[in-house]
Image (cartoon, rainbow, N blue to C red):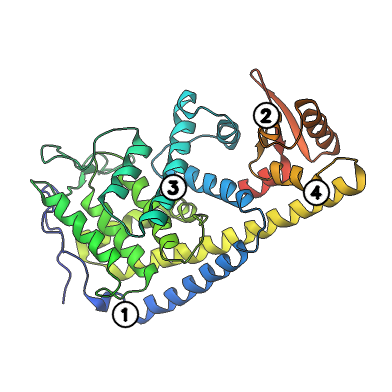
Amino acid sequence: MSYPINSDRNKPWNNIPNLPIDTSFYEDLDVYKQLVNAKAALGRLQGRSIAIPNQGMLINSISLQEAKASSAIENIFTTDDELYKAYSEENIQQLPGPAKEILFYREALWTGHKHLENNYTLDRDYFIKMYRIITGYNDGIRTPIAQIVIKEGGTGPNAGKVFYTPPRGTGIVEEKLDNLIEFLNDDDRYAIDPLLKMAIGHYQFEAIHPFRDGNGRTGRIFNINYLTSKGLLDYPILFLSKYIMDNKDDYYAGLSGITQRGSWKNWLIYMLKAVEVTSNITYNKINDIIAAKDAILQAIVEQTQITRPESLVNAIFTQPFTKVKHLVDAGLYSENTGRKYLDELSAMGVLEKRIIGKGTYYLNLELYRILSD
């Protein structure tokens, strides 16, 4: 059975095939081999992450990098310094544009994770909630009068030309989205490996394009939230958007390959490869963070008289930039003691003290290096 394609990119693709797709697309031997590799890498990551005593250390750092990479795909850029400084502040709304948008992404990532923990299944509310947090808008699924088209980017000869026109019409977007949700939730009727369902679901969501903005970021948040909801990860720590950012042309080529040629095989292999590669990257980062944390703790114990050294090390590994206020708010030390200890770690070369504007920040040099690689 051949997969129906979009024959006219200038017309709304209202006959996007409902899910499930023809099973021959994901029973291919090459797809199966890549699925085995992806599942093995993801399982190794899950096994390593649950052994970390301070989950916050990993969760905050890795998920922030995921937010940065996913936003960069949409040409929303900021430096690591700006991002980590922004994360150490309390009021996101007062931050400059790019950093604020990235932190909104991170907030959506965690809100989605908790939504699925509480509700167990995907629903329209989940997708709308993600969209609203990411964009700051208060509407929901786009209306039939919204003339949404996807245009070619870049500076090539086709730049600015219509690349794809998503479905449009009364009830059509809602119908397609409900079909996607049913496919993802019903594991009895659609007994497909969750990694394959994630890849299929991501394409379908992008093709439906249910919102007037933020569809790419919402779809990438779905990727990670779906894997945690299926028990493949305890927390949304997979650095999946890094692979997509590093292979951005292949990502868009994979999406258009299905729309224009019905090429599901290439897309499935691409997404499974993304899971494998980023699972290994995240696994290695976890090991590097743990090694750095242990070495710094040992140095503090041997070279200082700092009290509660383990708590202090956990605090400085929760995020790259630490403020005295973070230690006080956590109930670890008084303001004077917290400042004294952070200054002491700066003298040891563990932290770098920075005065930015009116604020004093302490940068964990090893954590910053590991996350920036």
- The amino acid pointed to by label 4 is Ile
Residue at 71% of width from left, 40% of height from top? 364
The three-letter code of the residue at mark 2 reads: Lys
Name the residue located 21 percent from the left edge and 74 percent from the top edge: 22
In this rendering, which labeled residue sits more in front, label 4 or label 1? 4
> Where residue 159 appears, x then y in whole percent?
27, 41
Residue occupying image coordinates x 14% and y 39%: 143
How far apart marks 1 and 2 lie (CA) works out to 54 Å
Q: Is residue 191 above or below residue 336?
A: below
Task: First in sequence, mark 3 or 2: give its number.
Answer: 3
Judging by the rendered image, the residue that carries numbered circle 4 is 296
Task: First in sequence, mark 2 or 4: give its number.
Answer: 4
- State the mark number for residue 123: none
Q: Amino acid at mark 3?
A: Leu
Numbered tag placed on residue 109 in the rendering: 3
Q: Nearer the viewer, mark 3 or mark 2?
A: 2
